[in-house]
Image: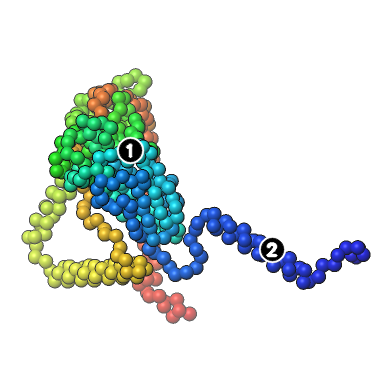
Amino acid sequence: MMASGAPRVTAGMRILSLALGVACAGAVALAAACANPSAPPGGPDDALPPLLLDVTPASGDTSVQPRVVTLQFDEVINETPAGSPDLASLVFISPRSGDVNVSWKRSRMDIRPKDGFRDSTVYTITVRPGIQDLRNNKIDSITTIVFSTRGPIPNTVLGGVLFDWPAGRGARDALVEAISVVDTTLAYLGVTDSVGRFKIRHVPAGQYLVRGFVDRNNNRALERTELWDTLRVPLRDSADVELYSYIHDTTAARMSNLVLQDSGRLLVATFDKPLAITQLFTPDQWSVRTLPDSTPVPQRVVRVRTRLQQQLADSADRKRRADSIAAIRDTVPPDSAALARADSVARIRRRDSLAAAERTQREARRQLALRGGRPLPKVDSTPPPKPSRTIPSTELLVQLDGPLPPNARIIVEVKGIATLSGVTGDVVRPYRTPERDTTPARPPARPDSAARRDTAAGPDTTARLR
């Protein structure tokens, strides 16, 4: 029962209160949307990345004195780029001029080095891929702006490849510095692409110390545990170099793992750092003894190879066997069934190839339509560079002339192991061989005799009996 003095709540008042609540919630959501830019709801599909409309100063300008370099896009860009913490992490100014300051102003970026642009210097500003719009459409290509604060821009190129030497491939997104020998405060910067290639353009002619390193913590400074390499290079018009980066340390190698394979006849020794490529590994460096009395085992080490040497040997063996089989096959004339099979396989492969090409063309047309006719970025079809030096190994395959006994405590010692940094030392590793496998061998599966009879009788036998 309602008290006589209390106001009466009508249905109209409830509706008015509900409307006010909805309006307040909408206002709060609108304010949050204004504070945090995000993709607007609805509308047509947008697969276009931001388009760079204007750069100030323009690339190629000479004798300009900018306070900032401005990049203007055709739409609002995201403050957080793809794969990086902020926009400043995508920008590199060459020559190095202190930390890079990047200001985000919706559809505009202002770039300025902390120490400002110095006079009589050619600057190259590189923006790595990663800038994206509010719908996460990302720019996949590198943007480069070149200008001089006084004088002409030289048409020189210092290029090459920075390899991750132990991995045997190009080091992607690594930094390369060309430090002037005359003025060590001048360090021109370059960034490697996805396969380790780099080009530092418009560098004045002279002598340079080229240093490349894999910046794992993205602080743009070489750390003790990062891969690097240096090379002194004279530059006139152009130069092409190869850098082989690895961790330079002063500690000897340690055997991090030991595994027995090939029925107890092969020891796979893994080391914690790459080994010297110039060292010749011989059986007399190795000794295997039993514990606790340290008596030598009767099995002897007969061969030591790196993983790459073993792969090359296996490849040569496969080629010899294939050549022998081909020589025998060539002496036997092919029958009509074999020719028919070969012709059928060729037709199937040709049909599959045409179907794959058609699918690729359909996808390209679809992407072109989504991008409003703007062509896709060019795909670099150049094969990845291969190192001309031998790839260092972290594994050694130690072949024995007989199987080691099961469940035995042994100690493996190798003398004079040299690392890629040139540090030599002896390595000792205890190991217990696996127990003998007593699991009985399973006989090959045979089809059930009843199943064979039913299959021979046909699937309708049961129905006929009924």
Q: Is residue 153 above or below residue 29?
A: above
What's the residue at 54%, 54% (across, down)? Answer: 35
Task: Identify which residue, 427 or 382, lies in the foreground.
Answer: 382
Residue mark closest to the camera, 1 vs 2: 1
Q: Which of the labelled discs sits on residue 97, or is there none?
A: 1
Q: Is residue 399 above or below residue 286?
A: below
Q: In the rendering, at what x and y percent does residue 250 appear?
A: 30, 25
Image quadrant where residue 121 sits: top left
Q: Is residue 358 above or below residue 400?
A: below
Q: What residue type is labelled 2?
A: Gly
Q: Which of the labelled discs sits on residue 21, or is there none?
A: 2
Q: In the rendering, at what x and y percent does residue 16 appear?
A: 73, 68
What's the residue at 38%, 35% (across, down)? Answer: 435
**As drawn, which residue projects farthest toward the left?**
331
Within-10-Å neighbours for mark 1: few <14, some 14–19, many 20+: many
What's the residue at 24%, 67% (across, down)? Answer: 353
Of callouts 1 and 2, the N-terminal one: 2
In this rendering, position of residue 401 left or right of residue 140: left
| Residue contact between numbered discs 1 and 2, judged by CB atoms under 8 Å | no
Q: In the rendering, at what x and y percent does residue 81 appear?
A: 41, 51
* Dot 2: element: helix
**As drawn, which residue projects farthest toward the top?**
293
Q: Is residue 23 above or below residue 219?
A: below
